[in-house]
Structure formats: C-alpha cells, structure tokens
C-alpha cells in the first residue's frame, strides 16, 4: 500500500514532469503564433503595395511554415491533456472519495441524454466529455459536461440562414434512485415557455409530454413545472421533503436546474458556462489553486447524493 507521503512525492514528481511539458508546448505555441501573425502582416503589406508578388509569396510560405510547426505540437498536447486528467485530476478526485474516477474518452451519450427526457427538444448537435463517476456512500453516480444544441433555418432574400441555439451547455448529473419507476416524471424551469406548456398540458393534455402534476408546495411551484405520465408515482417521488431538497439544491445553483426521474435513475441538468478539467497552458501547474474550481464542482456533485438523501433506501428495486 502506498503511503500518503509516497503519494505526495509521486504527485509532486508528476507535477514537475508535466510542468516541463507545459512550458515546452506553450513556448511552441507562442513562437509559431508569432510567426503566423508576422506572415499575415507581410501578406497584407504585399496586397496594399500592389505588385509585390514575391512579398506575398514569402508571407504565404512563412504562414505555412508556422502552421506546420504548430501542428507538430499536437501529439505532445494530447499527451499533456491525457496525463493531466489521468494523473493530477484523478489524484484530486481520490481526495474526495477513493471510488471517484474520470473518463475523458466516454461521457453521457446522446441517446442517454434524449432518453433522460430532461428537455422536450432533441439536439441537432451534441457533444459530451469528461465523465466523473463513482460512489457516494451506497449510491452510484456520474456527471458529464454536455453541450446540446438545436438549429433553426430561416429563409432570407439571400438564401437560408442556419442559427444554433443551446438546449444545455453545462453538466448533467445522473444517480441511481434505487427504484424502478413505472413512468417518467420531469421537473423543468418555470419560464414563460414552461408555464405555457403547463397550461397546454392542463387544457389540452394530448399535446403535452405527460400531464402536469399539481403539488402543494408554493416555493417549489414558483421555480418549477412538473410533468409525469404517472401521477401517483410522481407524488411518491416528490414528497414534501424531496421538494424542499430540490429547492435548496436549486438555490445553490446560478441558474434553474432541470430534473427527471426515469428508469431507475434521477437526472439533473445544471446550466454552466465554465469548461472543467482542462489543463492550462499559460498558467503554471505549480499554482496551489490550480484545481480549485474543478474540485468545487466535483464536491458539489458528490454532495447531491446527500442533499437528496439518495442513500436512504426507502424503496428497493423490483
């Protein structure tokens, strides 16, 4: 078994090795971005002063050289990113819980995102990365960074214009609820569209993704609209204490969260603008606050299990 002192020494050795690699990559980037910038300036000068074909050709040659040299840093950058996540980030995760791991190759799939029914609209473009997974007590959980978008096509006098809109840019949390649900219950932000959707659900249920669930919690009702295709089960899930916990979790988030209970899982979507678990290039790895925002995110996600009391097994799977 490796002692804490040996772990610290090992981590320090990894840090020093990665810091050397970071400086090398950063130096390559600075040098070759400068070359590309100078080449662009030379080309512009050649265009401004007509007839300087040789100057323009020289600028293009220098541009190609800078771009080729920059691309040569690609394999080193890939190695740096991999080592950063699987060494430094992985080490930091274990300080929260020994079971926690990070997977930068696989994350929440598009199919899982759609089947979660967190959002009414399916994405036209989807990307996920950096899945952190493990256990908090008895409960298995994971979370991934997700960017899901849909597109709109507008006909203009010059042709079609395609615009992209965010469904979610943030993090999707997923945990075992220890119950096989018979239906799906969705808790969504009560913005104008959701409020209108709630009216549609009540007035014209055929158009809704589940019927609206009327809950006796004014604070919860101010923030959320709840739909379900199993009204009885929805009330079993959204007990007064569960609604209070969700409301408290929502207060700790900058933007209103979305939840769904489906299969045997609870999904929670957090809109976030930050990009997590990415290695710095211009900032030293020896900075003691380097991983602060990443660890704060992991601790927040880890604590959700406690916040929602998911370790209390009040049901049991069928």
Image: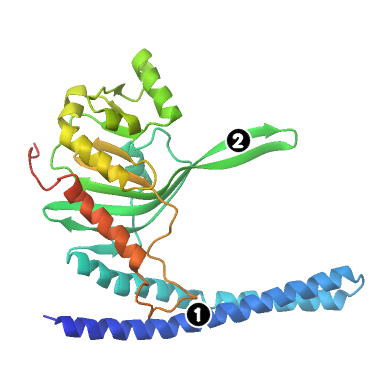
Q: Quadrant of the N terminus?
A: bottom left
Q: Quadrant of residue 52?
A: bottom right
Circle 1 packing at 10 Å, graded few (<14), some (14-19), many (20+), is many
Q: Which of 123 and 197 is in front in this view?
A: 197
Residue 22, percent from left and from top: 45, 80
Q: In which quarter of the image is the C terminus?
A: top left
21 left or right, relative to 247: right
Residue 48, percent from left and from top: 87, 68
- At x 46% / y 74%, what residue is drawn? 77
Helix, strand or loop status at disc 2: strand
- At x 34% / y 16%, what residue is drawn? 202
Tell me if residue 103 can be seen.
no
Q: Mark 2 points at which residue?
A: 153
Q: Quadrant of residue 41?
A: bottom right
Going by the picture, which residue comes out furthest to the front? Answer: 219
Q: What is the distance, in whole Å, between disc 1 and disc 2 at their CAs?
A: 41 Å
134 left or right, relative to 165: left
Helix, strand or loop status at disc 1: helix
Q: In this view, does 227 lie above or below 150?
A: above
Residue 78, percent from left and from top: 44, 72
Q: Residue 25 carries which label?
A: 1
Q: Do the residues labelled 1 and 2 touch (CB within 8 Å)?
A: no
Q: Which of 208 and 114 is in front in this view?
A: 208
Circle 2 packing at 10 Å, graded few (<14), some (14-19), many (20+), is few
Q: Which mark is residue 297?
A: none
Going by the picture, which residue comes out furthest to the right? Answer: 51
- At x 22% / y 50%, what residue is drawn? 304
Q: Is residue 206 above or below residue 194?
A: above
Residue 92, percent from left and from top: 27, 70
């Amino acid at each position: 078994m490796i002692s804490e002192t040996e772990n610290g020494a090992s981590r320090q050795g990894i840090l020093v090795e990665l810091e050397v690699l970071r400086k090398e990559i950063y130096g390559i980037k600075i040098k070759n971005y400068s070359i590309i910038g100078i080449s662009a300036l030379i080309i512009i000068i050649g265009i401004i002063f007509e007839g300087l074909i040789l100057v323009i050709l020289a600028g293009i040659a220098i541009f190609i050289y800078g771009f080729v040299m920059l691309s040569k840093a690609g394999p080193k950058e890939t190695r740096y990113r991999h080592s950063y996540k699987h060494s430094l980030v992985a080490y930091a995760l274990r300080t929260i819980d020994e079971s926690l791991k990070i997977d930068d190759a696989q994350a929440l799939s598009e199919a899982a995102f759609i089947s979660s029914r967190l959002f009414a609209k399916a994405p036209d473009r989807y990307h996920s990365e950096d899945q952190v997974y493990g256990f908090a007590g008895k409960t298995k959980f994971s979370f991934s960074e997700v960017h899901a978008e849909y597109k709109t096509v507008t006909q203009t006098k010059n042709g079609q214009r395609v615009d992209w809109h965010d469904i979610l840019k943030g993090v999707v949390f997923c945990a075992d609820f220890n119950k096989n649900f018979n239906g799906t219950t969705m808790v969504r932000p009560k913005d104008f569209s959701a409020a209108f959707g709630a009216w549609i659900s009540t007035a014209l249920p055929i158009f809704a993704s589940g019927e609206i669930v009327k809950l006796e919690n004014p604070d919860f009702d101010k923030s959320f609209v709840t739909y379900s295709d199993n009204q009885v089960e929805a009330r079993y899930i959204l007990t007064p204490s569960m609604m209070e916990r969700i409301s408290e979790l929502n207060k700790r988030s900058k933007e209103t969260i979305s939840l769904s209970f489906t299969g045997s899982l609870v999904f929670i979507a957090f809109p976030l603008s930050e990009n997590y678990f990415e290695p710095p290039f211009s900032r030293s790895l020896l900075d003691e606050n380097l991983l602060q925002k990443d660890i704060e995110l992991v601790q927040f996600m880890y604590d959700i299990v406690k916040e929602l009391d998911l370790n209390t097994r009040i049901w049991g799977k069928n």
